[in-house]
Image: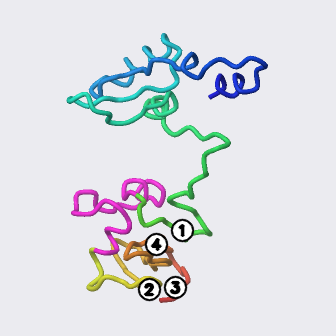
Amino acid sequence: TREFLLNAQSASPLPLGKLLRTPYLVHETIHADVLLREMQLKKAHMAIVLDEYGGTSGLITMEDLLEEIVGDIYDEFDEQEEQDIMPLEENLWRIQGGAPLDEINEALHVSLPEDEEFDTLGGLIYSRLTTIPEDGATPCVDAFGLHIQVEKVEDRRVVSALVRKTEAESAPALPC
């Protein structure tokens, strides 16, 4: 893109065909570490990924590779995602419906089952309800030593819930 912009501002611009580069093509079975090394050697910032038939499967960037290896990288262009588990006060958390149970177990020091047919807070809530809540509904669930009040349902999906440990002494009840 930089070359195109500089060329457009030039006193004697080159024909666009002279600015084109051969695309860097890779097969979708290439390992991330191998691709990273190849992209570094070729000074390529992106590659077109081909499937087994030679068709385009996708596009991968250097940032995609680095995030696959080291985890999410946030820059000034990325929107900050809301935390899955946010402590509000002692013994009270706001938890996103898509939060994995293993993360909840670690953050709240509880033992939610990880071998059930669900693996998110939303899945746990739905496993305890007898009906699918409508958008805007705020049902409550008591399960595994937790009192869970759904805060927001959108498109039949639990967006967030307030969670309190029920075994805590003198914990004020959540409104249901």
The residues colored magenta run: 100-126
Tag 1's secondary structure? strand
Q: Which residue is mark 2?
A: 137
Q: Which residue is mark 1?
A: 93
Magenta region includes residue 124: yes
Residue 161 percent across, percent down from the top left: 48, 73
Q: Which mark is residue 165?
A: 4
Label 1 near label 3: C-beta < 8 Å? no
Residue 108 percent across, percent down from the top left: 47, 61
| Residue 109 sits above or below residue 35 on the image | below
Instruction: Name which of mark 2 and mark 3 comes first in the sequence.
Output: 2
C-alpha gap between disc 2 and disc 1 = 19 Å
Magenta region includes residue 24: no
Instruction: Name which of mark 2 and mark 1 comes first in the sequence.
Output: 1
Looking at the rendered image, the disc whose residue lies closer to the viewer, 4 or 1, is 1
Q: Quadrant of residue 83?
A: bottom right
Looking at the rendered image, the disc whose residue lies closer to the viewer, 2 or 4, is 2
Q: Amino acid at mark 2?
A: Ala
Q: Which mark is residue 173?
A: 3
Tag 3's secondary structure? loop
C-alpha gap between disc 3 and disc 1 = 13 Å
Quadrant location of the N terminus in the rendered image: top right
Q: Amino acid at mark 3?
A: Ala
